């Protein structure tokens, strides 16, 4: 069974993207960065200051190893970590603060969807009002 380690969440999706890329074949750090830039169609390229420390951390964790040709490959532990659906497993909050942070992120997402006129969420106004009332009760509001 997949054992989710909370300490590995510091680089969010970057770690799993590296695992995904190394599933296909061993790569150097520069090849990992090139592949990410290519996959994002040139919109994003990770910085060496993000990729190389993460590769070293992953090597210390035992999920990758460095080959003689300076390429990295997955270890058995890394292959396990990269397995579907473990890498996309829903992460549940462990405290009220984490839950509130997640709620805040979802509110930001909904605000983006709403846009200036709120047209995309108009059909959901009843549900939004209900959630507002429930959150208001949690905060001691009399609304």
Image (tube, helix red, strand yellow):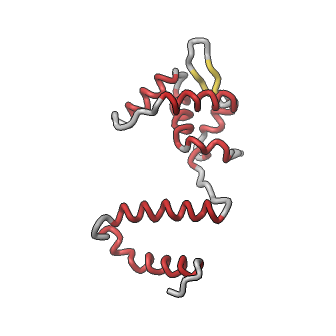
x, y percent for residue 21: 51, 31
Q: Is residue 4 above or below residue 136?
A: above
Name the one closer to the observer, 52 or 75: 52
Q: Vertical placement of 8 versus 104: above or below?
A: above
* Vertical position of residue 138 compared to residue 39: above or below: below
Q: Nearer the viewer, residue 131 or 82?
A: 131
- Image coordinates for residue 123, horizontal then vertical, percent: 35, 75
- Towards the viewer: 60 or 127: 60
Q: Indicate the position of residue 5 as horizontal and vertical percent values.
A: 68, 45
Relative depth, front residue between 124 and 14: 14
Total residue callouts: 0
Q: Toward which corner of the image does residue 64 lie, by quadrant? A: top right
Among all residues in the image, which is located at the extreme bottom?
142
Q: Farthest residue in the top direction? A: 68
- Figure quadrant of residue 115: bottom left
Q: Quarter-wise, where is residue 35 in the image? A: top left
**In this rendering, would 68 be left or right of 31?**
right
Position of 30 with respect to 54 (left or right) is left
Who's the residue at 61% across and 45% down the image? Answer: 9
- Residue 132 location, x and y as percent? 48, 77
Instruction: Tell me which residue sits at (53%, 87%) in the image.
Output: 142
* Residue occupying the point 50% across, 81% down: 133
Quadrant of image for the N terminus: top right
Instruction: Give the residue drawn at x 62%, y 46%.
Output: 86
Q: Is residue 81 above or below residue 24?
A: below
């Amino acid at each position: 069974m997949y054992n989710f380690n909370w300490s590995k969440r510091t680089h969010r999706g970057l770690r799993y993207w590296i695992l995904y890329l190394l599933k296909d074949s061993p790569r150097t750090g520069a090849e990992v960065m090139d592949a990410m830039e290519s996959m994002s169609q040139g919109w994003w390229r990770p910085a060496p200051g993000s990729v190389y420390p993460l590769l070293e951390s992953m090597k210390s964790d035992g999920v990758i190893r460095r080959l003689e040709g300076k390429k990295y490959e997955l270890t058995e532990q890394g292959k396990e970590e990269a397995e579907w659906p473990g890498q996309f497993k829903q992460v549940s909050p462990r405290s009220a603060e984490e839950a509130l942070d997640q709620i805040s992120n979802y509110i930001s997402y909904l605000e983006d969807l709403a846009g200036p006129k709120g047209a995309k969420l108009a059909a959901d106004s009843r549900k939004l009002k209900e959630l507002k009332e429930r959150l208001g009760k949690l905060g001691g509001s009399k609304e």
